[in-house]
Image (cartoon, grey):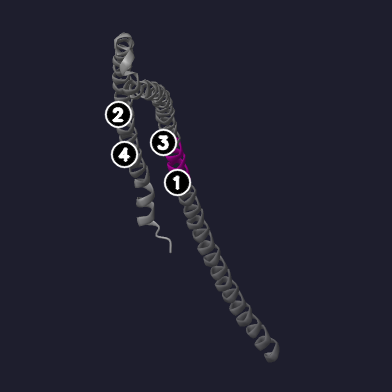
Amino acid sequence: MAENRLTREEDAVLQQKYLRALSSFEGIILSQIDIKNKLGDRLNYSIQAGIIILGAIAISIFVLLLTLSAQINRISDVVIDMNVHLASVADQMHRIREHMTSMEQRVALLEDIEDMTRVMGGAMDLIDSDMAAVGDTVRGINFHLATVRTNVGNISANMDIMNHEVQAMSHGIYQVAKPARSMNKIFPFP
């Protein structure tokens, strides 16, 4: 009987130890679950913050692309305008070349005057008419030179416009790049 009593007491002690160990194990498991839940919440917050940051970067890149597209369209318009003026200058230069050829031909006629001193009286009327034509040609050249000057002035004005557009584009790119620089300060990458 004494042995039975001892065995029962030992069983009761063992059972109490078992229950304590079981409750300790349960507490450890619950604390691990709680820690895992907190880590999971932090991970979710980090993922959400990363998604928001990536969205902001995507929007910044989109705005940058729109700005660049608008600037490229402006530059294209200026270049097309310059091409029109350059074509006009080429046409004026062609006309000047024709007038120069005409002048050379008339000057060649003037060189033959030395051989025609005998017929100078009749040739003077011819020379007068040729000189009038040369005067008209020179006036035409002056007119075309004025047109060329105007076209060169237009080209210069277009270059100034293009320079201002490039400066505006540079300023726009600088403004658009501010969020990216801020992001680089927050998240520096090697």
Q: How far separated are the C-alphas under marks 2 and 1?
A: 38 Å
**Range drawn in magenta:** 55-66
Q: Which residue is under mark 4?
A: 167
Across and down, in percent, residue 154 comes to: 32, 26
Q: How far separated are the C-alphas under marks 4 and 3?
A: 13 Å
Q: Amino acid at mark 2?
A: Ala
Callout 2: few (<14), some (14-19), or many (20+) C-alpha neighbours within 10 Å? few
Q: Which residue is under mark 2?
A: 157
Q: How far separated are the C-alphas under marks 4 and 2?
A: 15 Å
Q: Earlier in the sequence, mark 3 or mark 1?
A: 1
Q: Earlier in the sequence, mark 3 or mark 2?
A: 3
Seen in the picture, residue 12 relative to 50 is either above or below; the reply is: below
Q: At x 57% / y 71%, what residue is drawn?
A: 23
Q: Secondary structure at mark 1?
A: helix
Choose between 42 and 188: the one closer to the eye.
188
Seen in the picture, residue 122 relative to 38 is either above or below; the reply is: above
Callout in the foreground (4, 2):
2
Q: Which residue is under mark 3?
A: 67
Q: Are marks 2 and 1 in contact (CB under 8 Å)?
A: no
**Quadrant (top left/top right/bottom left/bottom right) for the C terminus:** bottom left
**Main SS of residues in magenta:** helix
Q: At x 30% / y 29%, what residue is drawn?
A: 157
